[in-house]
Amino acid sequence: MAVKIDEEKCTACGACVDTCPVAALKIDGKAKVDPDTCIDCGSCVDECPVEAISL
């Protein structure tokens, strides 16, 4: 899994959750990624308004 979430930048807005095609992200205080479900497509990276997610 190459998706990384910077918890200091994350505002828990949910944009990444809404855009993930495989429902690999959830909000639990901050965004969290399920490495077993994530397909590293990068949808969440493009959608994050605070650039808290990277590949």
Image (cartoon, rainbow, N blue to C red):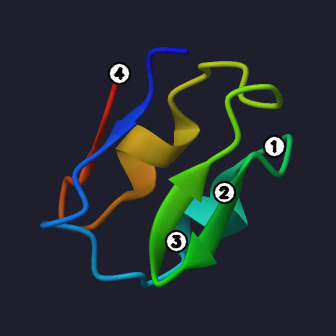
Q: Which residue is mark 3?
A: 15
Q: Do the CB atoms of the residues marked 1 and 4 lie less than 8 Å apart?
A: no
Kind of residue sitting beneath label 4:
Leu
When the figure is inspected, residue 21 is found, relative to residue 17, above or below; the finding is above
What secondary structure is marked by label 2?
Answer: helix
Left or right, 47 with reference to 6: right
Q: Do the CB atoms of the residues marked 2 and 3 lie less than 8 Å apart?
A: yes
Of the two numbered discs 1 and 4 on the same chain, state the one appearing first in sequence: 1
Q: Do the CB atoms of the residues marked 1 and 3 lie less than 8 Å apart?
A: no
> Going 25% across and 62% down the picture, which residue do you hit?
7
What secondary structure is marked by label 3?
Answer: helix
Res 52 quadrant in image: bottom left
Q: Do the CB atoms of the residues marked 2 and 1 lie less than 8 Å apart?
A: yes
Res 21 quadrant in image: top right
Q: Do the CB atoms of the residues marked 4 and 2 lie less than 8 Å apart?
A: no
Q: Which residue is mark 4?
A: 55
Of the two numbered discs 4 and 2 on the same chain, state the one appearing first in sequence: 2
